[in-house]
Image: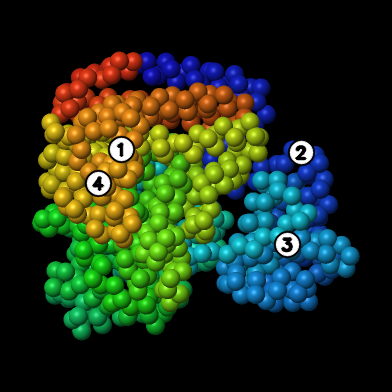
Amino acid sequence: MKLVILFRKILLTVLAIAASNSVRADNGYKLWLEYHQITDAGKVKAYTSQLGKVFFSAKSEQQQVAFNELSTGLVGTLNLRPIKVSSITDGELIIGTRDELRTISHVIAPDSVFERIGNEGYVIKSVVITGRKRIVVTANTDIGILYGVFGFLQLLETQKDLDKVNIVDYPRTMYRILDHWDNLNRTVERGYAGASIWNWHKLPEYIDQRYIDYARANASIGINGSVLNNVNANALILTPDYLIKVKALADAFRPYGIKVYLSVKFSSPIEIGKLKTADPLDSQVRQWWNDKANEIYRYIPDFGGFLVKANSEGQPGPQAYGRTHADGANMLADALAPHKGIVMWRAFVYDNNVPDDRAKQAYNEFKPLDGKFRPNVIVQVKNGPIDFQPREPFHPLFGAMPNTSLMMEFQITQEYLGFSTHLVFEAPLFKECLDADTYAHGKGTSVANVLEGKYNRKLITGMAGVANIGSDINWCGHPFAQANWFAFGRLAWNPGTSSDEIADEWLRLTFNNDPDFVKPMKRVMLQSRETTVNYMTPLGLHHIMGVNTHYGPGPWVDNAGRADWTAVYYHKADSNGIGFDRTSTGSNAVDQYMAPVRDKFENLNTCPDEYLLWFHHVKWTYPTKSGRNVWNELIYRYYSGADSVKSMQQIWNKMASKVDAERFIAVKQLMTIQYQEALRWRDACVLYFQTFSLLSIPAGYEKPAHSLSYYRDQKFFMPPGIGGNQ
């Protein structure tokens, strides 16, 4: 009842603000493609004088899509309807491929630039032609033109100066893919934004406008692929009844440069092919997959390929037949190779029956297979060795397989980061991994450099993100969760982009360019991930969430059906101390890293506090680098994390006049939930670990509101994200 009264007060307050607020309502559906009207009269005058006449042949389907986007953007930002001209020299804004602009290409850039940008890159440049300045957007291909137009419009909406613009941009990875964990019954595993957007019942005849808008949004940030279904796959997706539906989505996405992929179940030859085995070396099985691939490509000539989860968490795989991951992946790769398709084979494997640290198992299984995969196989590796935790060290497979194509797998959906009720900007998490130095080829061998194939140009490259998209009107559940989709696209395109740059651009595109809004909210975004780590899993703690649902704190979980699904397996708290010893005196997981990294993590004096309890079991009184002992440092971080959410609320409350009322109310209410949940995490974890440390909470910190039994006994019925495998 108190919450209802509180929300009523919030609503009345905001409505009063909205009455005097000129910012129009916005439900978030348009994401970062709102194309807000530019109100600076000087900029409007400068832009309109540069962009009124457009040369753009727009002959192909992709170029027509690009021209439509250009028109939408110019009308939205400048109320300018472009006039198409037929002569290059008449254009103020000139758009076309290098071949189409061959008469002026020498003025734009040398041949080496066009070679560097490849098939998907573009050039945006201010040039002088016949004595007049023009803006040129060019590329080698039509898809490059589409990306270039989006890039140009983003310059416009963020109000950049075009007078001396000179941008050469291109993707650093080949495959930039969203993985949808969507089931055929429209539930979404670990989805927190409503149902799946794929309405299989209405396909193929009904193409929802949302599919087109999905494709637009992805193209605008350089994503070029979509895995439509859950990695815990249903074999029905490969039947004709579903392939014709997949074809309809592929047709809708194609103008935006997006290929479709499917997660496949390794046992499909048995389940829908009526074979008695799925052994990858069996000739009948291999022929079944060859025939199935041929069938798929008859429906979808540019089909991307397969994503496979095998021999993990109960999913079938080649090991059931005494075969390796390479045997299974190569069988599928051979079926796809004639069609130029790829296999993304997940390295997320661990077995409760293997008596070794779960963090070591993927490395142990895949490292010996280096160089044994087909050229069109890319091994998809999670950013860390456990499972998308709020903080993990980078996965040791990065840099350990120089002769195998590796693909990053990030999780955009917030399975372990508060679902869609917590504001957590994930770019710093992604960057922490991408910028980490593996030392595989000496100092400077970052994870990003490995992913880009800089040390073996024969390898294919890519990055995958587990999508946070659903049927909610704002796509992602939380207005700020859209920024994580955006950040993934930006970093898949260029892993060198900074978190600051991404946050700044997203805020300006999604909300406005007001520095009094952008500056404080950028600080909030950039701090939000560290804030969340502090109130959930400080000092390298991990996997201490609620069982099954992964909702809320659960450091006490000690019976989840298997040891490596419990929390006690990971934190190992006892009267002597806390933490998982992964040094040479423990599980020796540190030995999977190259020597400089191994030595840093092994040595207590050099191991960063952020990973202290990931790699070491230390006494409660062990002094951390702050000077506080472990117990007091845990208290400090848990409390400062919750306090930081309170600060986030205070900053957001000052933004009412800067944003539309609809999103202001939504974020305000969600921050109220986040603060309550931060307090629950703080109090539950502090009280639980206190039963082992037997130390008091230092003076100056408020005592938890309830007893430990209160938090342990709390029940949360039917939280989102647990989708049946249908």
Residue reaching furthest right? 131
Q: Position of residue 554 (x, y in %)?
A: 22, 35
Mark sitting earlier along the chain (1/3): 3
Q: Position of residue 280 (x, y in %)?
A: 21, 77
From the viewer's perspective, is the residue at label 3 or at label 2 nearer?
3
Q: Is residue 104 left or right of residue 567?
A: right
Asked if residue 514 can be seen in this view, the reply is yes
CA separation in Å, label 1 and label 4: 10 Å
| Amino acid at dot 1 | Leu
Q: Residues within 10 Å of mark 4 (few under 14, many from 20)?
A: many
Q: Position of residue 51 (x, y in %)?
A: 79, 55
Q: Nearer the viewer, residue 18 or 677?
A: 677
From the viewer's perspective, is the residue at label 4 or at label 3 nearer?
4
Badge 4 marks a residue whose secondary structure is helix
Badge 2 is on which residue?
Answer: 40
Identify the image quadrant of the N terminus: top left
Mark sitting earlier along the chain (4/3): 3
Q: Which mark is residue 125?
A: 3
Q: Residue at x 17, y 74 (%)?
A: 323
Mark sitting earlier along the chain (1/4): 1
